[in-house]
Amino acid sequence: MKIIKIILIVPLFLVLWMFSVFAGENSVDVGLAGAAVEDVTAYLDAAGAAELLAERSDVTILDVRTPKEYSAGHIKGALNIDIFEDNFKEELGKLKKGKAYLVHCASGRRSQRSVAMMEELGFEKIYHLDGGFIAWKEAGNPVEIEEVEVDVEMEDKE
């Protein structure tokens, strides 16, 4: 019985290993000259994103949430371009393609679509914050909140 299990499990591990080596989303490809060429997009968890921002001041944070979400809390210094706006792709096209960008939304779905558009537009280095702003906050990373002025008239209670 143990031999049958081994015969079934070993090929499965071999296939999984081959898949991770040849098709991993963060894999390194070998260029024509034999030099390693990094993928355009790297996927980072909240800790990895915080580390990236601490180490590199040249990374632009791109927040693709709505302005309302952004003003309720965002990563300090983030540029906000709303993916729901009709001119979103046009606004992305105005950004410098040679710069590095850390892209996020609330949970990761909208930013994944944004990353695909950025790759299509020819951006050279994109970091995706997996889990989005929710993961960033849950990891205890700093959040900046815009102050909103509220004009409220108080009634006298006489």
Image: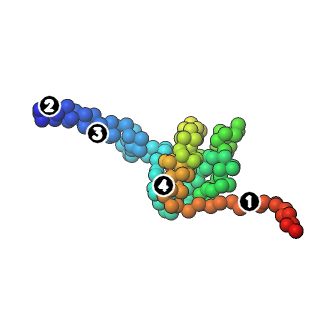
The quarter of the displayed image where residue 147 is located = bottom right
Residue where numbered disc 4 is placed: 46
Q: Position of residue 2 (x, y in %)?
A: 12, 35
Sequence-first disc among 3 and 2: 2
Q: Residue at image x 20%, y 31%?
A: 8
Asked which secondary structure carries label 4, the reply is helix
Q: Residue at x 63, y 46 (%)?
A: 65
Mark 2 or mark 1: name the one nearer the start of the chain: 2
Q: CA distance from mark 2 to mark 1?
A: 67 Å
Neighbourhood count class around disc 1 (C-alpha, 10 Å): few under 14, some 14–19, many 20 upward: few
Disc 4 crowd, CA 10 A, few/some/many (<14, 14-19, 20+): many
Mark 3 = which residue? 17
Say which element carries label 2.
helix
Name the disc covering residue 4, or none. 2
Q: Nearer the viewer, residue 152 or 36?
A: 152
Determine contact: label 3, label 2, CB under 8 Å: no
Callout 4, which amino acid? Ala
